Amino acid sequence: MTSLEEHFTGDKLDESVWLPYYLPHWSSREASRPTYEVRDGELRLSIPPEQGLWAEGVHETPLRVSCIQSANFSGPVGSTVGGQPFLTDQQVREQQETFWGYTPHFGHVEIRMRGEVSPRSMVAFWMSGIEDEPRKSGEICVMEAFGDAVRASSTEVGIGLHQFRDPALTEEWSALALGIDIAEFHTYAVDWRPGSLIFSLDGAEVRRIDQAPDYPVQLELGVFDFPGKPGPADHTPELVVSHIIGYPLT
């Protein structure tokens, strides 16, 4: 699949494109299952107060997640083969089938979304290397916003490139103070070409980076809650998405 035009029609996710779990190999499908619904042309990912922890006892700090991704690759139980490890020599806890839904290699990718967050939660959209080889791990962070970075007239939005285990890349990520309210719909996008990344907000360029991963990536989007941080325990953080579009650039 070289292009994607996802408008969330119908009442369920297209599971030929989306895996409705978050890195299940490091946790389990049961513990990484998101709370979500598809209705009225929108995907709504949320974390109600009763939702359990992700990777409990393994992740250093308590974490709750409702996230979907467009691919997944990992090895057998006990192996260290798997995407986005957060520990050294981390071992797979539950074996997963390899899944390639939408894995672009260069192109334009955009999301129109809004987020409801508290000081202890965040929303994010990013594109991570598929990691069928460890070096293919670079991450294009299109947007991430923590609730404690929301101000009266602006929000600090994380945008950029994470190196992780890719020796060909250099870390180049920071939070930009943008004059937006993330509770309202905005379109976040990246134009990804060999050796360059151009990030935009509502069609206007906000950052340019003169390097880029050179391998397929998977799309990931989700809402996160950190119970150990200060904030209301009864708040339900939510990410609402109206479309995700991807296509090759000429």
Image (tube, helix red, strand yellow):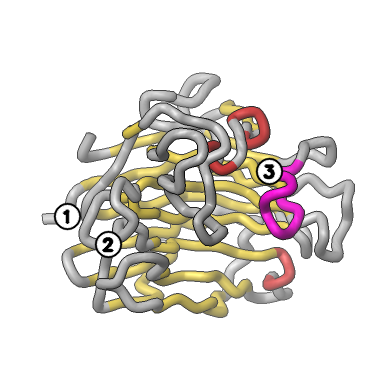
| Dot 1: element | loop
Q: Quadrant of residue 103?
A: top left
The residue to which callout 1 is attached is: 249
Q: Main secondary structure of the magenta part?
A: loop
The residue to which callout 3 is attached is: 54
Point out residue 29 in the picture as x, y percentages from the top left corner.
Answer: 59, 30
Q: Amino acid at mark 3?
A: Trp
Q: Report if residue 150 lies within the magenta region.
A: no
Q: Residues within 10 Å of mark 1 (few under 14, many from 20)?
A: few
**Do labels 2 and 1 touch, CB within 8 Å?**
yes
Q: Earlier in the sequence, mark 2 or mark 3?
A: 3
Please, is residue 93 above or below residue 180 in the view?
Answer: above
**Quadrant containing the N terminus in the rendered view:** top left
* Residue 199 relative to residue 80: left or right: left
Please, is residue 235 above or below residue 147 in the view?
Answer: above
Point out residue 154 in the picture as x, y percentages from the top left corner.
Answer: 63, 75
In the rendered structure, which segment of residues is drawn in magenta? 53-63
Q: Observer-nearest residue: 172 or 12?
A: 172
| Dot 3: element | loop
Point out residue 88 in the picture as x, y percentages from the top left corner.
Answer: 53, 61
| Dot 2: element | strand
Q: Calculate the distance from the C-alpha at mark 2 to the C-alpha at mark 1.
A: 8 Å
At 46% across and 40% down in the image, what residue appears?
69
Q: Residues within 10 Å of mark 3 (few under 14, many from 20)?
A: many
* Residue 196 relative to residue 102: left or right: left
Q: Observer-nearest residue: 116 or 203?
A: 116
Q: Amino acid at mark 2?
A: Asp
The residue to which callout 2 is attached is: 191
